[in-house]
Image (cartoon, helix red, strand yellow):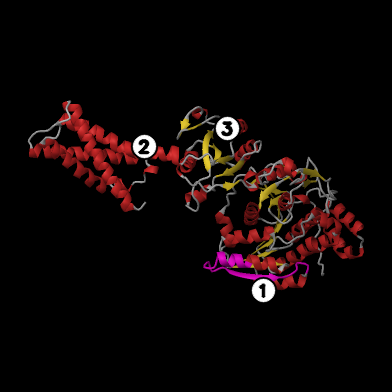
Amino acid sequence: MTYQQRLSIFIILDSFIILTAIFISGFLVNATTKIFSFPIVISAVTILLTHQYFSFRLKLYKKAWEYASIGELIIILKVVSYSILSAIAIQQVVVQETFLRLLAVTWTLHLLFIGGSRFVWRLYRDTVINKSDTKNRTLIIGAGSAGTMVTRQLLKDNESKLRPVAFIDDNKRKHHLDILGIPVIGGINSIADAVSSLEIDNIIIAIPSLSKKELNTIFQECAKTSAKTMILPLLEDLVTGKVSVNQFRDVQVDDLLGRDPVELDINSISSDITNNVVLVTGAGGSIGSEVSRQLAKFKPKTLVLLGHGENSIYSIELELRESYRDSGIEFITEIADIQDANKMMEIMESYRPEVVYHAAAHKHVPLMERNPEEAVKNNIIGTLNVAKAADWTNVKTFVMVSTDKAVNPTSVMGASKKIAEMIVQGVNQTSKTKFVAVRFGNVLGSRGSVIPLFKKQIEKGGPITVTHPDMVRYFMTIPEASRLVIQAGALANGGEVFVLDMGDPVKIVDLAKNLIKLSGNSFEDIGIEFTGIRPGEKLFEELLKEDEIHDEQIHPKIYVGKTARLYLEEIDEIITVYQNLDRNTLKEKILILANKDETSKPKEIMSVSI
C-alpha cells in the first residue's frame, strides 16, 4: 500500500470516527437521536477540520502503528484535545454558548475511538497475521533490555522464522511475570525443563554484557537440550550499527573460553611501534600473521613480513595493504629461511628494525618427534641466527614466541623451544638488545590446533578422535595471544621469560563435545573415539616450573618467570654434532638438555656459523 492510499484510508476512517463520536455523545447527553442542531453542526465541522489539521501538523498519519508505543498515544491525546478546545472556542464565538457536557463526552469517545482503531489493528497484526504455527518456538535467555528488544522485533517481524514463547532470567523478581505477553518461567537451571515442556526449537542468548565464563555456563545448560543455540551479535557491533539486534549468530568455540577481553597499555606499545621499523618472522603463520595485523594498528613506519612460504606471505601482504592502504605504512615482504644465517644478517642490516617479533618455528609435536633434526635446524639454529643478527644490528627489542610445551618438555618440539629460550636469554647477557621470550599455550584456530581437525572430522560424520579422556590444555584465541605478545615486548627489560595468563585449562574431550553441539549434531551422531597419547605428549601442560615462578605480576595477564640456568656450551655442542647423530640419539640429547636441572653457572654464548 502506498503512502497516498494509506493517507486516504486514515482520513476517511477518522472522519467517520469523529462523526460517530459526536452522534453518540449527543445521544448520551440529550437522550434523543434528534441531535443535529446548528451548534452541534458547527462543532462537528470544527472538530472534523481541526482534527485533520493537527493530525498533519503532529504527523499522526505518518506513524507506523505496528511499532506504536506511548509516544504515539500522547500524539493522539494532543490531536483530540486540540480539536475539542478549538470547538469550544468556535462555539463561544458563533453561538456565545459552550456545551461542555457534550464536548466532554465527545472528547472521551473521540480519544477512545481514534486510539482504539490504531491499537486494534496492531493487536490483529500481532495475534493473527504474525502468528504462524510454522515458526520455530524460541526460548529467550535474558529478560533485560536486550531480551525485550529481541522479543519485540521477533513479534513484529512477519518474515522471521522464530516465535518467542518464554523468557529465562536469573532475576527472581521477574519470575512468573509476563513481558510483552511472554512469560518469564525461571532461571538458567530451568533451561532443559523449559525446552522439553514447551517444545522449544531455538534458544537465543540475549545478554550482550555476559562474560565468557558466564556464557560458557549458560551454553552448557543449553547443550543438554536438542534446541539450536544462537547468540546476539557482539555488543560493539550493535552499538556501532554494523548489525541489528535480530541478526543472531551461532555460538562459536571462541565464545566459550571463559576469558575476559585483553586490555592493552596503548602508550607503552605505541612508543615502541609507532613510526618505527618492525620485523616479524613467520609472518605468514597463524601467530605471525595476527601479530602483524595487531602491529599495523599502531602505525609503524615500516612493517617487514618475513616468512618461508610465499603463498602465506603474499596473502597477509594483500590483506594488510588493503586494510591500511591510506595509513602510510610501508609493507615489505621477504621470502627467507631463518636457517640461512647470512640471509638473516643481510635482512637485519638492510632494514635496521627497532623491534623484532620472532614467531617462525616448527610447532607440530608428532612431526618433530619423527624429525628431530628439523626441530634443531629451525627452532634452535634458526632462533640463534635471527637473535645474532638482531644483536649485531642493535635491534632495540627482540621478542621470541615460545610455548607452554617448553616447561618440563617431553617432546622434541617442546625441548627445542626450551633450548631456544636459553639461546635468547644467553644472547641477552652480552647484548644491548633486550631479548625476551613469551610463553603461552594452544591457540584456537591455529594450523596446529585441534579445532580445525575436529571440524573436519565432524564434517565427515565423525568420529572425533581424542587421545585421552583426561587430556587438558590451555587455550586462548589467536588475537588475544598476539596482543599479549606485543604487550610483553613493550614491558621487556631483557632476559625475561614472560608467561601469558591462559585462564583455566580445558579438557579436550569437553572441547570436542562443545564443537559437536555447536555444529548442530548430537553426540550419538558423531561420537568420540579415544586413540591413546601420541609420542611426546603430556596429559597436561605447565606454564612455569616451580623454580621459575616470580612473585611479581607485571601486567594483569602477563607473568614474568625467573631466569633459568643456561647450558650454552651444551647447546653449542648439539648444534655442532646433530647432523652426525641418528634420530633417536639426537632426540635423547635434546630432551636431556632441555630438562637438565643441575646447578650450572651461565656461560657466554659461543659463535657458531651454519
> Pointer 2: what residue?
120
Q: Position of residue 303 (x, y in %)?
A: 62, 67
Q: Measure how far apart labels 1 and 3 are at the Cα level.
A: 69 Å
Disc 3: CA contacts within 10 A as few (<14), some (14-19) or many (>=20):
few
Front residue of this view, candidates 289 and 174? 174
Determine which of the numbered discs, if any, sits on residue 198 in the image: 3
Kindly tell me whether residue 190 is visible in this rendering.
yes
State the quadrant of the C terminus.
bottom right
Q: Are marks 3 and 2 in contact (CB under 8 Å)?
A: no
- What residue type is disc 2 on? Val
Residue 436 percent across, percent down from the top left: 70, 56
Residue type at the position of mark 1: Ser
Q: Secondary structure at mark 3?
A: loop
Residues rendered magenta in the picture: 317-339
Q: In this orientation, does residue 276 appear? A: no
Q: Is residue 217 left or right of residue 360?
A: left
In the image, residue 401 lies in the stretch drawn in magenta: no
**Eyeballing the image, is 15 above or below 455?**
above
Label 1's element?
A: helix
Residue 382 lies, in percent from the top left, at 77, 64
Return the residue nearer the eye: 519 or 133: 133
Instruction: Find disc 1 in the rendering and name its residue.
Output: 350
Residue drawn at 30 percent across, 49 percent down: 7
